[in-house]
Image (spheres, rainbow, N blue to C red):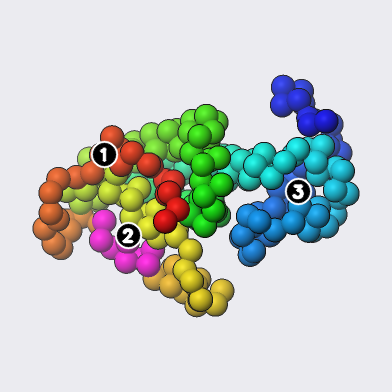
């Protein structure tokens, strides 16, 4: 029987759940969402029965991984707003922290099943709305202080980040890290005021960018 979400977990149950989520993130990231549940249990150091008590099916585990990733990014985004000395520094920190979203983005792109589950899940949708609201606050503050070019909108930043987080095919881990770091540096340079080129059309708003940080699989 699955754990009632309204009941707090005992310490050992919480530990098992955390171990399962950590293992699922590693395995999903390396092998995709179709890896056998037995492999995830083995990596987590728990029995398959324990895994199914926490997560009765693959979809519930995938959604838990997505929720955990969103929650970590939102916590980091709030900390960036509270701790950084400028809105630009908060934006840079938020975008870099958003690497936690990479697994969720990759899973939704690679698997139609995952994409449908995450897009239809009300809790995941609420996480996305909250994260985008924080991003919008940081973008507006950075523009007010004059550090973010004025001809972009929050939708532009979200769309660029979503593209950056997409998986790269046939690239080694070392090369992927270097490509990702260089791409992030180029992204930040392109967003820094005053901007070096004229952009077509007007700034993209969150209303324009309906999908937020999720992407439908091709």
Residue position marked by numbered label 2 in the rendering: 188
Instruction: Say which residue appears at 30% left-offset and 42% top-offset.
Output: 209
What count of labels does the image hold?
3
Residue 202: image quadrant is top left
Please name which of the two marks, 2 or 1, marks the residue nearer to the observer: 1
Residue 28 visible, this orientation: yes
Please name which of the two marks, 2 or 3, marks the residue nearer to the observer: 3
**Image coordinates for residue 212, horizontal then vertical, percent:** 38, 42
User: In the displayed structure, does residue 39 sit left or right of residue 108?
Assistant: right
Residue 206: image quadrant is top left
Crowd class of label 3 (few under 14; some 14 to 19; many from 20; radius 10 Å)? many
Crowd class of label 2 (few under 14; some 14 to 19; many from 20; radius 10 Å)? some
Query: In the displayed structure, would residue 147 be above or below residue 70?
Result: below
The Cα atoms of the two marked residues, 2 and 1, are separated by 22 Å
Residue position marked by numbered label 3 in the rendering: 20
Instruction: Give the mark nearer the N terminus: 2 vs 3.
Output: 3
Residue position marked by numbered label 1 in the rendering: 208
Residue 85 visible, this orientation: no
User: In the displayed structure, does residue 86 sit left or right of residue 174?
Assistant: left
Instruction: Say which residue appears at 39% left-offset and 71% top-offset.
Output: 182
| Secondary structure of the residue carrying numbered label 3 | helix
Instruction: Say which residue appears at 81% left-offset and 44% top-offset.
Output: 51
- For the magenta stretch, what is the residue range? 183-191
Crowd class of label 1 (few under 14; some 14 to 19; many from 20; radius 10 Å)? few
Instruction: Give the mark nearer the N terminus: 2 vs 1.
Output: 2
């Amino acid at each position: 029987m699955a754990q009632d979400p309204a009941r707090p977990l005992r310490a050992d149950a919480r530990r098992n759940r955390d171990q399962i989520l950590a293992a699922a993130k590693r395995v999903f990231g390396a092998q995709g969402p179709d890896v056998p549940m037995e492999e995830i249990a083995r990596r987590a150091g728990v029995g398959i029965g324990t895994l199914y008590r926490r997560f009765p099916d693959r979809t519930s585990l995938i959604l838990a991984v997505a929720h955990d990733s969103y929650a970590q990014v939102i916590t980091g985004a709030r900390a960036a707003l509270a701790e950084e000395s400028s809105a630009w520094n908060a934006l840079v920190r938020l975008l870099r922290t958003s690497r936690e979203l990479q697994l969720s983005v990759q899973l939704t792109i690679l698997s139609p099943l995952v994409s449908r589950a995450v897009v239809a899940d009300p809790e995941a949708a609420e996480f996305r709305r909250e994260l985008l609201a924080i991003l919008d606050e940081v973008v507006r503050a950075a523009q007010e202080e004059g550090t973010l070019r004025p001809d972009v909108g929050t939708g532009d930043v979200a769309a660029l980040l979503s593209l950056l987080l997409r998986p790269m095919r046939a690239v080694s881990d070392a090369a992927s890290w270097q490509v990702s770091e260089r791409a992030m540096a180029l992204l930040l340079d392109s967003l820094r005021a005053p901007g070096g080129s004229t952009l077509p059309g007007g700034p993209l708003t969150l209303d324009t960018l309906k999908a937020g940080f999720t992407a439908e699989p091709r």
